[in-house]
């Protein structure tokens, strides 16, 4: 199996984001910590973690749809910077 999963919810009025990346994509430059950090920035937050799994939080739940919509471009960008 190969893939990237970014899940989000709102807990106590604040966005919570979790990212998971499979090993083959980590080798190609996609890292969950980097991905979740960029997504969290859109919702006014931050976070990080390991290359395979990371979590983040934010302050602006209204921007969560915009943050999740940014994921495909962030993955594509990371793939372009990784080792092929």
Image (spheres, rainbow, N blue to C red):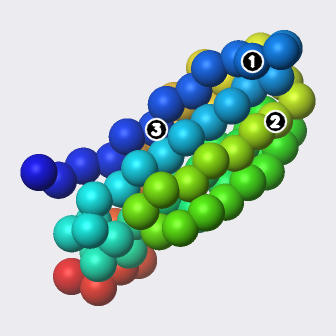
Counting other residues with Cα less than 10 Å from the Cα at mark 1, is it few (<14), some (14-19), or many (20 or more)? few
Say which residue label 1 marks: 11
How far separated are the C-alphas under marks 2 and 3? 15 Å
Residue 83: x %, y % from top left: 29, 85
Above/below status of 38 relative to 62 = below
The mark closer to the camera, 2 or 1, is 1
Quick check: can you spot residue 81?
Answer: yes
The mark closer to the camera, 3 or 1, is 1
Label 2: state its secondary structure.
loop
Give whichever of discs 2 and 1 has the lower sequence position. 1
Mark number, residue 6? 3
Instruction: Compare residues 21 and 76 and report the one nearer the observer.
Output: 21
In the rendered structure, the answer to whether residue 36 lies left or right of residue 6 reads: right
Residue 27: x %, y % from top left: 29, 78
Say which residue label 2 marks: 58
Above/below status of 56 relative to 34 = above
Instruction: Compare residues 22 and 41 and report the one nearer the observer.
Output: 22
Instruction: Compare residues 62 and 73 and report the one nearer the observer.
Output: 62
Residue 19: x %, y % from top left: 49, 46
Q: Residue at x 34, y 71 (%)?
A: 26
Q: Are marks 2 and 3 in contact (CB under 8 Å)?
A: no
Q: Residue at x 73, y 54 (%)?
A: 47
Counting other residues with Cα less than 10 Å from the Cα at mark 3, is it few (<14), some (14-19), or many (20 or more)? some
Give whichever of discs 3 and 1 has the lower sequence position. 3
Q: Residue at x 28, y 59 (%)?
A: 22
Q: Residue at x 24, y 49 (%)?
A: 3
Instruction: Compare residues 4 and 81 and report the one nearer the observer.
Output: 4
Residue that lies at the very extreme toward the left in this rendered image: 1
Tell me the quarter of the image containing the C terminus.
bottom left
Place residue 30 in its image quadrant: bottom left
Counting other residues with Cα less than 10 Å from the Cα at mark 2, is it few (<14), some (14-19), or many (20 or more)? many
In the rendered structure, the answer to whether residue 43 lies left or right of residue 24 reads: right
């Amino acid at each position: 199996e190969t893939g990237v999963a970014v899940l989000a919810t709102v807990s106590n009025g604040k966005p919570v984001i979790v990212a998971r990346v499979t090993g083959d994509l980590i080798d190609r430059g996609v890292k969950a910590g980097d991905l979740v950090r960029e997504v969290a920035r859109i919702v006014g937050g931050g976070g990080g973690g390991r290359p395979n799994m990371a979590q983040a939080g934010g302050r602006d739940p209204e921007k969560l749809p915009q943050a999740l919509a940014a994921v495909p471009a962030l993955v594509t960008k990371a793939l372009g910077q990784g080792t092929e």
